Each structure stands twice: as structure tokens, then as C-alpha cells.
Image: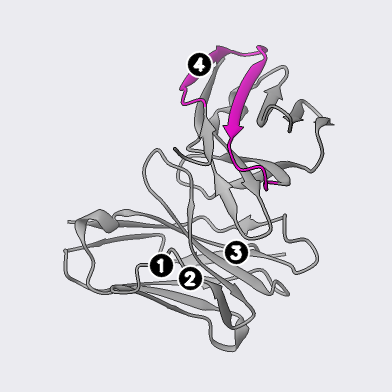
Amino acid sequence: QKEVEQDPGPLSVPEGAIVSLNCTYSNSAFQYFMWYRQYSRKGPELLMYTYSSGNKEDGRFTAQVDKSSKYISLFIRDSQPSDSATYLCAMRDDYKLSFGAGTTVTVRA
Amino acid sequence: EAGVVQSPRYKIIEKKQPVAFWCNPISGHNTLYWYRQNLGQGPELLIRYENEEAVDDSQLPKDRFSAERLKGVDSTLKIQPAELGDSAVYLCASSHRDSGNTIYFGEGSWLTVV
């Protein structure tokens, strides 16, 4: 079993919809939680980073962490066609950063 | 400020041939990473450098992969000989010692072994 499991997708939503992306993890040592966005043929780009349980907002993006359930989520409000990309969750302990497999999102105009 | 620069962006080689990838990290970033990303998967760490020292190379297949980071700046990742299963994207990334959770990735070197 992988340390980080991500909902596989793909997801296709109409413009303006809320996108919900989820990951679960098994390693209790993970302390830092990130979401990366990866456009086709590009490297991953850090979107959000959080440390504690709870919610963190940045514009249209909200990251949610529930350490007791070992579950993290990313919500994208008012989705735009430019949000079409693969979203990767990532988690870090003292030693390494572990990624989920990614969820590909398409926002239809 | 320039980001992480990688070259070549794309490479097609025949199996058993050697290949090398080059990375120039963001200026001032002491930590450099090489990741491999297979199609439909997340990146997996191959090696991590702190300055010129490789501090984590546990996932580097040392029989055919090698890496170096001379003078603690640029880095080269080499595969010799390449196998079909090495087809993947090789991502270089860097971070500053004071913000290790903010890791910046390059655009990747896309390798196809035929």
C-alpha cells in the first residue's frame, strides 16, 4: 500500500463549478501538506502549503487537513478553464516529500 | 528571478545508450533534488543534495544511475546504459535551507527510450 493515496479522477466539470480533490495517507509522521498544480508538459508548481489541521484559504483555493482521519482536500471555487491541470497532493515528514499520483481536472468553458 | 533550468527538455535514445540531464537550481538554493515521474504517477525522489553532498540517494538505482553536484550549484544526472523502463520525466527541483517546504521544480527532461 502506498503512503499517499489520491482519488484518481479524471474530473470534468463545467466552468464555475466547485472542484473537490482528496488524498489519504498512512504515515503519521507526515507534518506538512502541500498541493501542487502541474500543467501538461510542465513541472509541478506549489499551490498551497499547510502544517496544521483545519482550513487554509488562498483566493479561490481552500486546503483542508484532518490529521485525525489522515485526510486532506483541496477545493477550487468558481473553477476556470485555466484551472485545467493535474493536481498532486504531497506530504512531508522529516526526511522526504511523498506525492500522490495526481488527479487530472478539466474545466469546460 | 530565473527558475530551475533543465536541459535537454526532450531526449529520445535507443536502449543501452547513455544519457545525461543537466540542472541549474535557483540562485542561493542549497538543496537540490532529482525526481523521476512516470506517466500517470507522482514524482519519486531519486537523490537529494545539501550543497555538494548527496544526503539521500537511497532510491537511486546505482547500477546504472549516477549524479553529481560539483561546487554545490549545477547538477548532472546520468543513466548508462538506459533501459526501456527508464522512459519518464526527470525533474530537478531546489529549495532554500530556510524554507525547505517550498520546493521549486523545473520543467523536466522528457526521456523516451526505444
**Mark 4 or 2, closer to the camera:** 2
Q: Is residue B56 left or right of residue B3?
A: left
Residue ID for mark 2: B57
Look at 23% across and 66% down and name the residue there: B82
* Residue B85: image location, x then y, percent: 25, 54
* Residue B39: image location, x then y, percent: 36, 42
| Residue type at the position of mark 4 | Ser
Number of marks in picture? 4
Report how far apart the C-alphas of labels 2 and 1 lie in the structure.
5 Å
**Residue A22, picture quadrant:** top right
- On whether residue A20 falls in the magenta region, the answer is yes
Q: Depth check: A54 or B114 in front?
A: A54
Given contact means CB atoms under 8 Å apart, are the residues at marks 3 and 1 in contact? Answer: no
**Mark 3 or 2, closer to the camera:** 2
Q: Depth check: A44 or B56 in front?
A: B56
Given contact means CB atoms under 8 Å apart, are the residues at marks 3 and 2 in contact? Answer: no
Mark number for residue B60? 1
**Residue B4, picture quadrant:** bottom right
Q: Depth check: A43 or A8 in front?
A: A8
Residue count near mark 1 (Cα–Cα under 10 Å), binned few <14, some 14–19, many ≥20: some
* Residue B1: image location, x then y, percent: 72, 64
Given contact means CB atoms under 8 Å apart, are the residues at marks 4 and 3 in contact? Answer: no
Label 3 secondary element: loop
**Residue B25, picture quadrant:** bottom right
- The magenta segment is A7-30
Identify whether A95 is placed above or below B54.
above
Residue ID for mark 4: A12
Residue ID for mark 3: B4
Q: Depth check: A65 or A13 in front?
A: A65
Look at 29% across and 73% down and name the residue there: B64
Report how far apart the C-alphas of labels 4 and 1 lie in the structure.
36 Å
| Residue type at the position of mark 2 | Asp
